């Protein structure tokens, strides 16, 4: 038979075994054998439970508990067995005593969830939370002699929820106005300061170059030393001193978290539920987009009543991420706000500039339009027909310029918020029909039908008639510009809510992708067919802003290939404003008439239009008489002007409106030269050049590009596509004519278009196999290539005479790797060839001597081999760059040069040529020599002038010349008292 004591504790696990071994006779409970049956039953219930249970029995409140409870009291087990609970839990007795006393005195059980309790179970004063039930325990007589406690620890749950609330407060805080970094940091520390049990104090340090600056901090009660007085304001990250590293900030700024002990000695800050001093802090890097460059550091205190375990560290990791995200968002918002403010300021400055410039334009325009109108209306001294045509052209384009200025001025006023509506009571249907009638002739001339449906409205409408005229005019002009067949319909109608203007067409339509941007400033639908490419890109934006100014809105619906409908809707509430009492302005219909005048220019169809040559002044034996010029420009006045100007030179001019018509005209009747604008509908000038150069039949056709697009980028694009020259509007007529003559002469003297044609007459190679120096109108430069049968004799090059403007003369050429013979005594090259004008190829005192120095060509000293070597001499004039490009391109056609390398070299050489022409001072010879060498998989171009170089002021600098040359090749420059040589070198097959 087992002993009762053993039976009592048998199922109690480890704690039961300890209780069985305990000498209970030495405790207030006495020997187990003397225990009443009620106590034995209560002990069996406690030991058999897997839930934490504590039995307090007797006046001494002796403790009996199970294994689950022993885990809750930590180091106090097993000494607590049989001992007084008031001793074991002395630190928390002030909280437990009322609950236990209540259960014993009232005999009523209690339940307290999440009871905060101070425990010293792990070597420090710990903040713990328990959900506890206290029930009375009765003896065999039914008297309350103890308390049965059932409890569960909820510390992790309570602390975890509290920390989550802090993280939530950080993410949700802010009122929408604290968007700068400093205000955001202040908000963050305020939120952190509301949770001192987890974060006793905190400070945010942000990186500012090589230092950390404290942006905000929190912690401590007003009665204690403030945190701000203890923590440093600025810390140098590179400072090695102990003071700088006292709080671990430099290390954390490098991305390494730091535990900071000994906080009590530096910052005696009470913390936790019971005011214990803070002992430890953490210096944590605030992560940024750059992993090795933290945004800053969060310095935070650790609660003295919670263990810095993995869960606590994870919380701080989440805290730093939350702070970092908020600060980064604030920084990005600040940057975006600064960008927006900068853009707004630029927009304001631009608007002010447009306003000022528009006002300044009005005075000279008035002084142009007034005299022009007077001249056209003068019956006392009428203009001759040719002069009248010129004056009418000037008057039309000055009027168009005034319209553009007025549009810019109106738009700038709208942008600046200074525009206003000078509202008048108007008969809106009658006004709209009157404006539409101005367009009728132009619409019908375009082969379209104009439908006007403007029935009377039930009552007058109050709006600004000038603004309404601009709205109607822009919508009708837009419809005419993009409609080629069908009709244009304009209508006015109304219902109970609004008045509507509708302009519908059967034009090309607008894609859905472009509709959202249609009313944006300067937006233009790319690639759409139109009657003209001209325009500012603010017409529809102006309609949108003017409609808003009148209190309405603009709506658009469109389908590609079907048509477009614009609707301007004005609510009756805005259409019934009080009208202005000031006199109405004059000029009603002027905007519409100016728009129609411009539109008529789009409708002139020049297909097949030819200007026959006129009797030109000058020598009757002009070799260019009858030359065929093709002009491509979408501006009718410009076509008429160019046709009149060029026909006056004795040339036959044909004009077309776009690149597509130009290609068709070239196929029908190849011209001697193409003169093209850049901005054209259907096919622009650059695409035209690209297609001409891609077609072997038109590769050598001279192309001169005219454009209002000024700037080096535009010219580089045109020249890189293969254009022979690029001229910016406005241009001088004499310069245009000179450039055309040069291009045509060069093309006619260049047999590249027909390399199979054998030379005849003076161009034939003379007996004796000696190659002549080409005359001014001579043949293409020859080049040496492997296997060449060219004889050994070669001529030298003499300086060109001073030239005031391009004459179209072919530069002299000589060939490398061949001996240089002296010229004959008569000064003429062997074979009898003479330059144009009868001048000998060799001039000056060195006429009978072989050239030396830079004027001599040899292949032995260049280290580049003898695959090809050629040299040209050009007059020192701006048009020589185009001639040089053509010569180099043709020479390299016989060599396997990568296409990109060729284009790069031509661009770089053009810049070198331009610099030689523009910046050579007091040249001893008014010419530029260009040398081309190919060998050993490399190509080299040398450009030499014969003058001194001057310092360039910024205003004189081309801006990108040196950049282009260095970007497209290895550049060397040698400057001496006799001149400057620029050498550009590249590999033949490497485009990189």
Image (tube, rainbow, N blue to C red):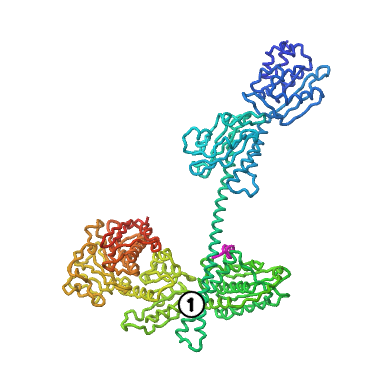
> Residue 527 location, x and y as percent?
51, 67
| Quadrant of the image occupied by residue 829 | bottom left
Q: Position of residue 780 (x, y in %)?
A: 28, 70
Left or right of 175 on screen, residue 986 = left
Instruction: Let me know if residue 297 is in the magenta part.
Output: no
Can the viewer see residue 315?
no
Quadrant of the image occupied by residue 625 = bottom left
Q: Which residue is labeled 1 in the image?
A: 636
The residue depicted at 69 percent of the width and 20 percent of the height is 88
- Vertical side of 600 occupied by 782: above or below: above
Residue 216 lies, with reference to residue 550, above or below; the image says above
Question: Is residue 175 at all visible to an observer of this figure?
Answer: yes
Looking at the picture, does residue 966 appear above or below residue 642? above
> What secondary structure is the magenta-colored segment mainly?
loop
Q: Quadrant of the N terminus?
A: top right
Q: Badge 1 local density, few (<14 within 10 Å), some, or many (20+)?
A: many
The single residue placed furthest to the bottom in the displayed view is: 380
Instruction: Indicate whether 113 appears above or below 105.
Output: below
Q: Which of these two is toward me, 65 or 719?
A: 719
User: What is the residue that sits farthest to the right in this orientation?
Assistant: 141
Q: Horizontal and vertical percent for residue 842?
A: 21, 71
Image quarter of the C terminus: bottom left
Specify start and end residues of the magenta stretch as a single range.
512-522
Q: Judge from the rendering whether residue 356 lies leftward or rightward of residue 749; answer left or right.
A: right
Toward the viewer: 199 or 675? 199
Q: Is residue 516 magenta?
A: yes
């Amino acid at each position: 038979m087992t002993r009762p004591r053993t039976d009592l504790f048998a199922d109690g696990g480890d704690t039961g075994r300890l209780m069985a071994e305990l000498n209970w006779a030495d405790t207030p409970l006495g020997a187990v054998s003397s225990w009443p049956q009620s106590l034995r039953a209560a002990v069996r219930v406690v030991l058999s439970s897997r839930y934490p249970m504590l039995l307090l029995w007797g006046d001494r409140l002796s403790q009996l508990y199970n294994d689950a409870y022993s885990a809750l009291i930590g180091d106090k087990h097993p000494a607590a067995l049989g001992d007084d609970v008031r001793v074991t839990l002395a630190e928390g007795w002030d909280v437990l005593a009322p609950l236990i006393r209540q259960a014993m005195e009232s005999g009523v059980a209690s339940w307290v969830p999440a009871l905060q309790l101070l425990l010293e179970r792990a070597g420090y004063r710990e903040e713990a939370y328990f959900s506890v039930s206290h029930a009375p325990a009765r003896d065999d007589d039914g008297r309350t002699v103890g308390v049965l406690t059932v409890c569960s620890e909820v510390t992790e749950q309570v602390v975890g929820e509290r920390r989550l609330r802090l993280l939530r407060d950080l993410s949700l805080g802010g009122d929408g106005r604290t968007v700068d970094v400093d205000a955001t940091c202040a908000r963050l520390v305020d939120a952190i300061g509301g949770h001192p049990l987890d974060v006793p104090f905190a400070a945010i340090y942000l990186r500012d170059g090589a230092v950390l600056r404290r942006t905000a901090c929190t912690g401590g009660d007003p009665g204690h030393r403030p945190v701000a007085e203890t923590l440093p304001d600025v810390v140098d990250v590179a400072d090695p001193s102990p003071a700088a590293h006292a709080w671990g900030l430099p290390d954390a700024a490098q991305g390494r978290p730091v535990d900071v002990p000994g906080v009590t000695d530096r910052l005696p800050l009470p913390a936790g539920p019971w005011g214990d001093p803070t002992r430890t802090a953490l210096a944590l890097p605030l992560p940024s987009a750059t992993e090795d460059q933290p945004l800053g550091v969060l310095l935070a205190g650790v609660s003295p009543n919670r263990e810095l375990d993995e869960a606590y560290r994870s919380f701080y990791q989440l805290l730093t991420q939350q702070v970092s995200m908020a600060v980064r968002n604030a920084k990005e918002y600040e940057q975006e706000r600064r960008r927006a403010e900068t853009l707004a300021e630029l927009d304001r400055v631009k608007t002010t500039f447009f306003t000022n410039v528009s006002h300044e334009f009005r005075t000279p325009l008035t002084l142009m339009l007034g005299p022009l109108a007077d001249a056209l209306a003068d019956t006392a001294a009428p203009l001759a027909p040719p002069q009248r045509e010129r004056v009418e052209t000037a008057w039309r384009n000055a009027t168009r310029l005034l319209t553009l200025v007025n549009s810019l001025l109106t738009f700038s006023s709208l942008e600046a918020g200074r525009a206003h509506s000078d509202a008048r009571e108007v008969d809106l249907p009658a006004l709209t029909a009157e404006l539409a009638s101005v367009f009728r002739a132009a619409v019908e001339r375009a082969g379209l039908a104009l439908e006007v449906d403007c029935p009377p409205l039930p009552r007058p409408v109050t709006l600004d008639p000038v603004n309404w005229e601009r709205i109607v005019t822009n919508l009708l002009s837009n419809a005419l510009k993009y409609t080629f067949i069908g009709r244009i319909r304009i209508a006015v109608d109304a219902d109970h809510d609004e008045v509507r203007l509708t302009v519908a067409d059967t034009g090309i339509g607008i894609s859905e992708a472009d509709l959202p941007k249609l009313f944006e400033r300067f937006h233009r639908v790319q690639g759409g067919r139109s009657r003209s490419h001209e325009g500012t890109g603010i017409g529809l934006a102006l309609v949108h802003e003017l409609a808003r100014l009148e209190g309405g809105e603009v709506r658009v619906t469109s389908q590609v290939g079907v048509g477009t409908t614009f609707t301007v809707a004005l609510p009756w509430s805005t259409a019934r404003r009080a009208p202005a009492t000031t006199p109405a302005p004059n000029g009603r219909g002027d905007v519409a008439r100016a728009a129609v005048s411009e539109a008529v220019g789009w409708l002139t169809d020049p297909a097949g239009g030819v200007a026959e040559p006129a009797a030109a002044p000058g020598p009757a034996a002009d070799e260019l008489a009858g030359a065929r010029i093709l002009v491509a420009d979408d501006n009718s006045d410009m076509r008429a002007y160019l046709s009149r100007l060029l026909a006056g030179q004795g040339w036959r001019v044909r004009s077309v409106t776009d690149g597509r018509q130009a290609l068709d005209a070239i196929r029908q009747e190849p011209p001697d030269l193409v003169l093209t604008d850049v901005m054209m509908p259907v096919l622009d000038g650059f695409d035209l050049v690209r297609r001409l150069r891609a077609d072997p039949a038109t590769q050598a056709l001279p192309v001169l590009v005219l454009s209002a697009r000024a700037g080096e980028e535009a010219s580089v694009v045109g020249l890189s596509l293969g254009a022979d020259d690029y001229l910016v509007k406005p241009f001088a007529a004499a310069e245009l004519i000179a450039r055309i003559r040069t291009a045509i002469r060069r093309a006619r003297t260049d047999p590249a278009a027909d390399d199979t044609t054998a030379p005849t007459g003076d161009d034939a190679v003379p007996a004796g196999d000696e190659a002549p120096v080409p005359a001014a109108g001579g043949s293409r430069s020859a080049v040496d290539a492997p296997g060449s049968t060219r004889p050994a004799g070669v001529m030298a090059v003499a300086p060109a005479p001073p030239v005031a403007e391009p004459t179209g003369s072919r530069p002299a050429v000589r060939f490398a790797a061949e001996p240089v013979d002296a010229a004959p005594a008569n000064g003429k090259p062997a074979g009898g060839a003479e330059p144009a004008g009868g001048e000998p190829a060799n001039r000056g005192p060195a006429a009978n001597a072989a050239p030396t120095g830079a004027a001599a060509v040899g292949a032995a000293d260049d280290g580049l081999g003898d695959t090809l070597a050629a040299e040209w001499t050009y007059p020192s004039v701006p048009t020589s760059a185009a001639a040089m490009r053509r010569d180099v391109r043709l020479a390299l056609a016989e060599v396997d040069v990568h296409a990109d390398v060729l284009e790069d070299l031509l661009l770089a050489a053009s810049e070198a040529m331009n610099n030689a022409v523009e910046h050579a001072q007091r040249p001893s010879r008014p010419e530029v020599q260009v040398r081309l060498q190919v060998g050993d998989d490399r190509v080299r171009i040398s450009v030499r002038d014969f003058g001194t170089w001057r310092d360039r002021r910024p205003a004189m600098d081309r801006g990108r010349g040196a950049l282009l040359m260095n970007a497209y090749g290895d550049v060397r420059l040698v400057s001496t008292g006799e001149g400057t040589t620029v050498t550009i070198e590249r590999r033949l097959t490497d485009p990189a």
